[in-house]
Image (tube, helix red, strand yellow):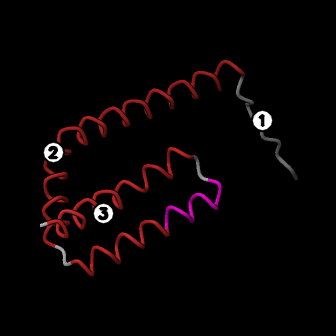
Amino acid sequence: MTTATKTIEPTTTDTREALTQHARDAAATVSTVATDLTARLPEVATEVDRIVRSGSDDTLRLATAAVIGCSVGLLAGGAGRLVVLASLLPAVLMGVVLSGRRST
């Protein structure tokens, strides 16, 4: 004894509406997160600057080498140039701090 169940296939319009709603939800989430990030960015930047400036020279050298190594790995792995350049920003910050310490 078998019972047949009828499945209703979604139409193209239903699928399109569902995808549109998911895209709207994702855009709203990104907008909310971006607003929160923008509000906290100055506080985070100040904290990062404080931590980098309070680090020892050896720690900064090691961290700079690690960041450069990760950036080279991203480049070798085929990451986009913009991603690689963005990954080098911490190394630039630490390099500036190190060079400022040597000149004083």
Q: Which residue is mark 1?
A: 6
Q: Which residue is mark 3?
A: 95
Q: Does residue 77 show up magenta in the picture?
A: yes
Side (left or right) of 10 relative to 82: right
Badge 2 amino acid: Pro
Q: Farthest front residue?
A: 103
The local crowd at label 3, few if under 14, some if 14 to 19, many if 20 or more residues have their Cα within 10 Å, is some
Q: Secondary structure at mark 1?
A: loop
Pointer 1 with pointer 2, Cβ within 8 A: no
Position above or below: 26 against 53: above
Q: Does residue 33 show up magenta in the picture?
A: no
Position above or below: 72 against 25: below
Q: Main secondary structure of the magenta part?
A: helix
Label number found at residue 42:
2
**Label 1 – label 2 distance at C-alpha:** 58 Å
**Label 3 – label 1 distance at C-alpha:** 67 Å
Q: Quadrant of residue 39?
A: top left
Q: Position of residue 72 (x, y in %)?
A: 55, 63
